[in-house]
Image (cartoon, rainbow, N blue to C red):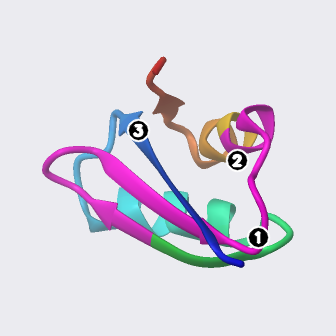
Protein backbone atom coordinates (compact mmCIF):
# COMPACT_ATOMS: atom_id res chain seq x y z
CA UNK A 1 0.00 0.00 0.00
CA UNK A 2 1.38 3.40 -0.97
CA UNK A 3 2.20 5.94 1.72
CA UNK A 4 2.01 9.68 1.06
CA UNK A 5 3.85 12.17 3.28
CA UNK A 6 4.20 15.92 2.97
CA UNK A 7 7.25 17.87 4.10
CA UNK A 8 8.21 21.54 4.02
CA UNK A 9 11.52 22.39 2.35
CA UNK A 10 13.04 25.84 2.80
CA UNK A 11 15.36 27.70 0.47
CA UNK A 12 13.87 26.68 -2.89
CA UNK A 13 13.47 29.63 -5.26
CA UNK A 14 13.37 28.29 -8.83
CA UNK A 15 12.74 25.30 -11.07
CA UNK A 16 16.36 24.15 -10.65
CA UNK A 17 15.71 23.91 -6.90
CA UNK A 18 12.63 21.79 -7.58
CA UNK A 19 14.62 19.49 -9.90
CA UNK A 20 17.42 19.07 -7.34
CA UNK A 21 15.07 18.17 -4.49
CA UNK A 22 12.96 15.91 -6.72
CA UNK A 23 16.04 14.08 -7.98
CA UNK A 24 17.45 13.38 -4.52
CA UNK A 25 14.13 12.23 -3.07
CA UNK A 26 13.30 10.07 -6.08
CA UNK A 27 16.61 8.24 -5.52
CA UNK A 28 15.47 7.01 -2.10
CA UNK A 29 14.47 3.33 -2.10
CA UNK A 30 10.74 2.80 -2.54
CA UNK A 31 9.88 6.33 -3.66
CA UNK A 32 7.30 6.25 -6.46
CA UNK A 33 6.49 9.95 -6.90
CA UNK A 34 7.65 13.37 -5.71
CA UNK A 35 5.56 16.52 -6.15
CA UNK A 36 6.97 19.94 -5.24
CA UNK A 37 5.00 23.17 -4.78
CA UNK A 38 7.65 25.86 -5.16
CA UNK A 39 5.43 28.64 -3.80
CA UNK A 40 4.68 26.97 -0.46
CA UNK A 41 7.76 24.75 -0.21
CA UNK A 42 5.50 21.72 0.24
CA UNK A 43 7.01 18.46 -0.98
CA UNK A 44 4.71 15.46 -1.24
CA UNK A 45 6.39 12.07 -1.45
CA UNK A 46 4.56 8.86 -2.32
CA UNK A 47 6.44 5.69 -1.42
CA UNK A 48 5.91 1.96 -1.04
CA UNK A 49 6.40 2.19 2.73
CA UNK A 50 6.96 4.97 5.28
CA UNK A 51 10.29 6.77 4.87
CA UNK A 52 12.59 7.51 7.77
CA UNK A 53 12.66 11.25 8.51
CA UNK A 54 16.46 11.09 8.70
CA UNK A 55 16.61 9.69 5.14
CA UNK A 56 14.33 12.43 3.82
CA UNK A 57 16.33 15.10 5.66
CA UNK A 58 19.62 13.73 4.28
CA UNK A 59 18.27 13.72 0.71
CA UNK A 60 17.03 17.30 1.01
CA UNK A 61 20.37 18.34 2.55
CA UNK A 62 22.22 16.65 -0.31
CA UNK A 63 20.18 18.74 -2.75
CA UNK A 64 21.34 21.86 -0.89
CA UNK A 65 18.15 22.74 0.97
CA UNK A 66 16.70 22.31 4.43
CA UNK A 67 13.80 20.28 5.72
CA UNK A 68 11.73 22.47 8.04
CA UNK A 69 11.01 21.04 11.47
CA UNK A 70 7.53 19.63 11.75
Contact (Cβ within 8 Å) of mark 2 with mark 1: yes
Contact (Cβ within 8 Å) of mark 1 with mark 3: no
Which residue is located at x 41 percent, y 38 percent?
A: 9
Residue 16 percent across, percent down from the top left: 37, 65
Residue 61 percent across, percent down from the top left: 64, 36
Q: Residues within 10 Å of mark 2 (few under 14, many from 20)?
A: many
What span is in magenta?
35-56
Q: Which of marks 2 and 1 is nearer the N terminus?
A: 1
Which residue is located at x 81 percent, y 73 percent?
A: 30
Which residue is located at x 67 percent, y 35 percent?
A: 57
Q: Earlier in the sequence, mark 1 or mark 3?
A: 3
**Residue sitting nearer the eye, 10 or 46:** 46
Q: Which of marks 3 and 2 is nearer the N terminus?
A: 3
Q: In this view, does 53 lie to the left or right of 21?
A: right
Quadrant into which the N terminus falls? bottom right
Res 31 quadrant in image? bottom right
Q: Residue furthest front?
A: 1
Q: In this view, does 11 lie to the left or right of 50?
A: left
Residue 39 percent across, percent down from the top left: 13, 51
Q: Mark 2 points at which residue?
A: 59
Q: Residues within 10 Å of mark 1 (few under 14, many from 20)?
A: few
Q: Name the residue under label 3.
A: 9
**Residue sitting nearer the eye, 1 or 18:** 1
- Secondary structure of residue under mark 1: loop
- Secondary structure of residue under mark 3: strand
Q: Name the residue under label 1.
A: 27
Disc 1/disc 3 C-alpha distance (Å): 17 Å
Q: Is residue 54 magenta?
A: yes
**Residue sitting nearer the eye, 65 or 5:** 5
Q: Does the magenta stretch include residue 52?
A: yes
Which residue is located at x 70 percent, y 47 percent?
A: 59
Amino acid sequence: MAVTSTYTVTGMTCSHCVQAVTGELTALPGVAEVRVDLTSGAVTVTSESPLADDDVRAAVDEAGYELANA
